Amino acid sequence: MPDAAIFADTGDEPDAVYDHLRWLMSPNVLPFPVHITSTGRLSEKLFQGDDEARVPFHVGAGGLSKRQCTRNYKLRPIRRKVRKLLGVGPKGRIAAGAVEIWVGISLDEAIRIKPSGRDYLTNRWPLIEKRIRRTDCMRWLERRGYDVPPKSSCVYCPYRSDAQWRDLRDSDPAGWQRAVEVDRRLREPDQVARFRGQLYAHRSCKPLDQVDLSTPEDHGQLNLFLNECEGMCGV
Ligand code: SF4
């Protein structure tokens, strides 16, 4: 049994994720506490010019912008919280292998397996160890009468296929509007100067609300989230 769960909040998740989190934290749901940790709202920090909040948006001139968000808004806050729970300060030594972190990625997402990068943290992937796929998790939940949880990621995260953008647009209008607004702000003149070019959430480098997402042309399109994102994003 874990001692605790930690959710690193970027402040930019879909509303359904926060609803689900509130339910998980309500009495008599989980037999261990859920802690929320945050470095602030990622999109706000990005527009304030914080280099540590860089998101890998598509660059109009080609390529992707540098990604700092996962490390600074997911991995580091979790490590800080682990230290706090252990009562060890930022410079304090923690014995190698002292903490085991269970990362909830399923067998379908095995490509996202990564070591923790810290001696004192040992990552484990219990669903993968038991060869459990996402559909198995959904069946498990449905059999017990639980809602299927929404997928977690920032609403504007550029690691999305067209099918995933369509799903956001069609199933979460408020989240889609937030993504459209963040995408639009990326190209305000002061942001263009700050980012040394125009950035876009969608790989076509068009404003998000002008992208044609109407055709199911995703066959063979990579799921960028699986290929690009660290294990901690979108768990
Ligand atoms: S979900 Fe995407 S935008 Fe959000 S922290 Fe992870 S990589 Fe960055």
Image (cartoon, rainbow, N blue to C red):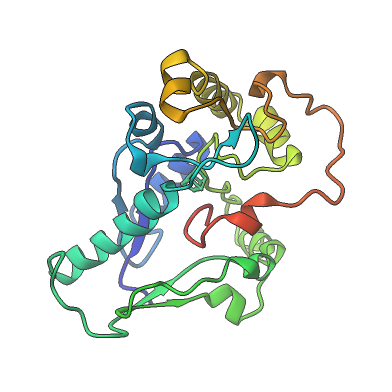
From the top left corner, tell me how far across and down residue 61 is, in percent.
63, 31
Q: Is residue 11 above or below residue 214?
A: below
* Marker count (numbered): 0
Residue that protrudes farthest toward the top in the picture: 189
Q: Is residue 174 left or right of residue 40?
A: right
Residue occupying image coordinates x 59% and y 81%: 129
- Quarter of the image for residue 30 reads bottom left
Residue nearer the viewer, 145 or 129: 129
Q: Is residue 168 at least partly visible in the picture?
A: yes
Q: Is residue 60 above or below residue 23?
A: above
Q: Is residue 95 left or right of residue 187?
A: left
Where's the N terminus, which quadrant?
bottom left
- Quarter of the image for residue 132 reads bottom right
Q: Is residue 140 left or right of residue 41?
A: right
From the top left corner, tell me how far across and down residue 194 is, in percent.
41, 26
Residue occupying image coordinates x 72% and y 31%: 204
From the top left corner, tell me how far across and down residue 78 is, in percent.
32, 59
Q: Is residue 98 above or below residue 62?
A: below
From the top left corner, tell me how far across and down residue 91 is, in percent.
14, 68
Q: Is residue 197 above or below residue 106?
A: above
Q: Is residue 194 left or right of residue 217?
A: left
Residue occupying image coordinates x 61% and y 81%: 130
Q: Is residue 8 at least partly visible in the picture?
A: no
Residue occupying image coordinates x 47% and y 39%: 13
